[in-house]
Image (spheres, grey):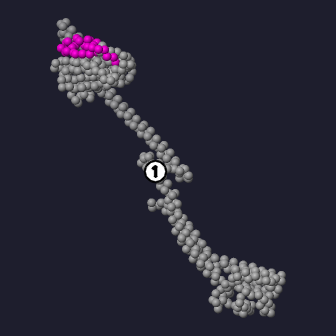
Amino acid sequence: MKHSITRKITTIMIAIVAGTVLLCWFINTTLLEDYYISHKKDILIDTFKTVDEAYANGNGNTEDFEIELEKQCANSNITLMVISSDGTIMQSNVSNKDMLLEQFLDIMFSTRSQDAVVVENTKDYTVEKTPDTRLKSDYLVLYGTLQNGNQILLRTALESIKESVEIANRFLAYVGILSVIVCAVILYFVTRKITNPILKLAEISQRMTNLDFDAKFESKGENEIDFLGEHMNQMSETLEHTISELKSANNQLKIDIEKKEQIDEMRKEFISNVSHELKTPIALIQGYAEGLQECINDDAESREFYCDVIMDEADKMNRMVKNLLTLNQLESGNEQVVFERFDIVELIQGVINATAILREQEGITLTFEQKEPMYVWADEFKTEQVLTNYISNAIHYAANEKRINITVTKKDDIVRIGVFNSGNPIPEPDIEHIWEKFYKVDKARTREYGGNGIGLSIVKAIMDSFHRECGVNNYENGVEFWFELDGKSS
């Protein structure tokens, strides 16, 4: 990533470390030498005070004092000389005393270099930085007068200080470069450890924007990022649950809208079909009633014919209205279904007997071979309606040899009743529509016997209320309608 946190943190920390190293190097370069000189000056003054105190107390020539002074001068690289007022060397820690005495006299008689710089000056001593032209090196020199009147000269070389500063700066530069490299490597891995969970959270959030809630953050619960990851997981689950509810609600809303549209369509279709079915009988009733009123035919036979037509059409309208009321109650669930155990064979035989006159008029033969009782669980009255509809349809549509065959078969706990009539099969495109209200396969034939396309809709509604199946099978020589009932013995 161009602006990744890892790169930014690493760059910032390296800049801080490098800046710190450079600052230390600058301070060393500019101030360390002066600090060393100041420190050396303090050592020279401490040595002067030690010698002054020892001579004041009469301990200047003791062995213990000489050992201690030699040790202090050796540790601090100090050259020392004490001379009396008559020029006698009282104490010195160098082998070439004459040369040091000569320098001492040069200082005492102010013949020192013009480049000498006074560092500190008191009534007892003077400290100055002075070059040695012969050795071409700088020294820090303290000269002064002791309490007993003796003169003292203390000197330490500054070249070691300069060399120490150069070495320290060089070492600091090496350490600084190494520190920056090591810091960069450590920071890279440390920041990666911090930013990797953040990148994981970013990936999870990206997947969440695409409604993918399978990704989860593996939290150890140790730091703020882990807590954030846990909250991201909780948010993911909440969003998934909320979106699921919204989708369910949206889907239900779509279903409700589709149902409303279907109901509206069914209502329009129902009104259209009812209007169509009532239009013909009403027109006939109105026409024949007007004929009677105007006395078109005065003979009794014609009047009786007119009245028969009016009564027949009124009967058709009455039967259609009753069927519509029955179908409406079944579809709305207001019709109570009473399950009871009864003999289906006996019920079939009763319907056969009730329709005997119609079959005789049409010249139809009916066969039903089942003689033994067979008990089922269902609403007996509604089952009789289903069977009556099937047999009535079979009578009206029977053709060719004009034969009807009723069968009862039992498989497991299911009893299937089939009503077959010889004739023409139902066209395949019409089979899926025959259970719809007002649908007629042969409209001319239906009108001929007074059908209105509601009977099979009532059958389907009754079987749905039983939670059982019904259907139709085409054969080469006819059609079989069937329905199933619960045949459990208990």
Depth order, front residue of 66/359: 66
- Above or below residue 452? Residue 236 is below
Per the image, is 364 magenta? yes
Q: Is residue 364 left or right of residue 184?
A: left
Amino acid marked by disc 1: Ile
Q: Residue at x 67, y 84 (%)?
A: 157
Which residues are drawn in magenta? Answer: 348-376
- Above or below residue 304? Residue 2 is below
Per the image, is 38 magenta? no
Q: Residue at x 62, y 79 (%)?
A: 164
Where, quadrant-wise, is the N terminus in this rendering?
bottom left
Depth order, front residue of 484/136: 484
Q: Secondary structure at mark 1?
A: helix
Where, quadrant-wise, is the C terminus in this rendering?
top left
Give the residue furthest to the front.
63
In which image quadrant can residue 337 be found?
top left
In which image quadrant can residue 58 be found?
bottom right
Give the residue furthest to the left.
400
Depth order, front residue of 246/46: 46
Q: Residue at x 35, y 29 (%)?
A: 263
- Above or below residue 282? Residue 9 is below
Q: Residue at x 56, y 71 (%)?
A: 176
Give the residue number, with chain letter if any, for mark 1: 204
Q: Position of residue 68 (x, y in %)?
A: 76, 80
Q: Is residue 449 visible?
A: no
Q: Position of residue 459 (x, y in %)?
A: 30, 22
Q: Position of residue 111 (x, y in %)?
A: 71, 92
Q: Is residue 241 left or right of residue 489?
A: right
